[in-house]
Image: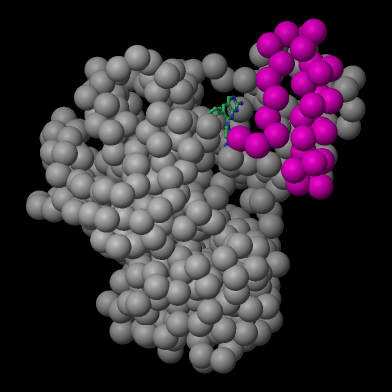
Amino acid sequence: MFQKILIANRGEIALRIQRACRELGIPTVAVHSTADAEAMHVRLADESVCVGPPAARDSYLNMPAILSAAAITGADAIHPGYGFLSENAEFAEMVEAHGMTFIGPSPAHIRMMGDKIAAKTAMASLGVPLVPGSAGELADLPEAQAVADIIGYPVLIKAAAGGGGRGMKVAQTAADLPDAWRLARAEARAAFGNDAVYMEKYLDKPRHIELQVMADAHGHVVHFGERDCSLQRRHQKLLEEAGSPVLSAAQRDAIGLTVTQALVKLGYRNAGTIEFLYQDGQFAFIEMNTRLQVEHPVTEMVCGVDLVREQIRIAAGQELGYTQADIRFSGHAIECRINAEDPETFSPTPGRVTTYHAPGGLGVRVDSALFAGYMVPPYYDSMIAKLIVHTPTRPEAIARMRRCLDEFVVQGVKTTLPLHRRIIDSPEFLSGDYTIHWLEQFVGQAH
Ligand code: MV4
């Protein structure tokens, strides 16, 4: 097992990883920017190193500074959390080149899944269902037109280096395609320095359902079921559920088997999330994330597993030690992401938190690095807490979430708590009958 783990992140996820380390008896090193010197992830770590000024590119994305911090503190492994350097293949390579372990997949798999075309090609060859579309990169507009004629409009042009919704253009009809083509390529070049694009049939009312997997270095792969992440606004998730309100146990088993068999053949290692669009009872693979995700707690609650502990054990070479048949899905879990944002405009609201009171009780979990007196800095993501509830059934989870949202008090900065109270009371959310588009129109409604 590792002697000391450096956590290359901040906020709630840095604390989350520290907690797993502490329970495994592994000392931790926190890194922080000058803006985070007083932050909870620094206070609770065994050691801490300042890695640079506030801007993320100078601190949490500063690879030489983070590697130096690991070297001088004698850390033998680095956990990247999510965001920042978590899906940076070059960083994972540098960690290994310095004789340390990157707690995550191999650099080759991170690189493969970062290229959305390579990811789709690999998954298709392994028997995972895809959205109908181009067989890889499109060379020119005539080829795009030919593919669109075969799969039928509407179509989407996506950037190979994209993901998370950036650089996507819809063409409703053949007349829209030339503009969509030019815009998608220009945006891809500007945003990613790579103008490779591909095409997919545009699905008009899908849900976003993702599967959590874990693979050890000995050829064993299991899945921990799905999360429904359809409640998003501008590609920012607000609320996630495990399991999906629309999936049966048989459907979960079937897609889980397809995915785990594919990842065994791929030789994948550590945690991963396979993202699907789900429409008309069909799964279509779109992307794979090669990191721990923000919403991992809902999976932990229904499976009774510590995913960060599993990541650390696997990275240290240990076997999973259980099979798919040992994994049971129990009850329902919901997570609300609480952001320091205006709940109407979604503009960030940095500032000092004067009052902080978190809810509690049976089946309630709050993952947060917040405390009364904390100054929410303007430099980073605005998420300040995750509220997770777990109960036997979905209606009970909704009732518990409503109760917890009413108990939760954050004063001094505006938060998205009032929006979550509205969502949890809406008939559409209650019914579970929503698509990826529902929240966009709901937030704009009079209330
Ligand atoms: C799509 C789609 C419809 N059809 N692909 C957006 C983020 C990126 N991960 C994939 N995205 C989409 N891809 C096809 N073929 C609709 C979206 C999409 C979306 C997906 C998941 C969650 C929220 C979304 C919001 C708008 C569009």
Expressed as whole percent of the image width and height from the top left, the position of residue 126 reads 61, 44
Image coordinates of residue 407 in percent, x first then y, are: 14, 44
Taking 349 as reference, is 166 above or below it? Answer: above
Q: Quadrant of the N terminus?
A: bottom left
- Residues 78 and 245: in front is 78
Residue at 39% from the left image edge and 69% from the top image edge: 39
Prevailing SS of the magenta stretch: helix
Question: Does residue 437 appear to the left or right of 195 in the view shown?
Answer: left
Q: Position of residue 249 (x, y in %)?
A: 29, 35
> Where, quadrant-wise, is the C terminus in this rendering?
top left
In this view of the protein, can residue 104 be seen by the observer? yes
Pick the residue in front: 214 or 207.
207
Looking at the image, residue 242 lies above or below residue 327: above
Number of dots carrying numbers: 0
Q: Residue at x 76, y 46 (%)?
A: 192
Q: Is residue 103 left or right of residue 187?
A: left
Q: Nearer the viewer, residue 16 or 408?
A: 408
Q: Quadrant of residue 342?
A: top left
Query: In this picture, is 12 found above or below 96?
Result: above
Instruction: Residue at 16%, 30% (x, y): give it.
Output: 395
Where 286 falls versus 447 (above or below)? below
- Whole-percent x and y of residue 319? 41, 72
Asked if residue 212 can be seen in this view, the reply is no
- Residue at 40 percent across and 73 percent down: it is 38
191 is within the stretch colored magenta: yes
Q: How is the image coloured?
A: one colour
Q: Which residues are magenta?
A: 165-193
Q: Quadrant of ligand 1?
A: top right
* In magenta segment, residue 309: no
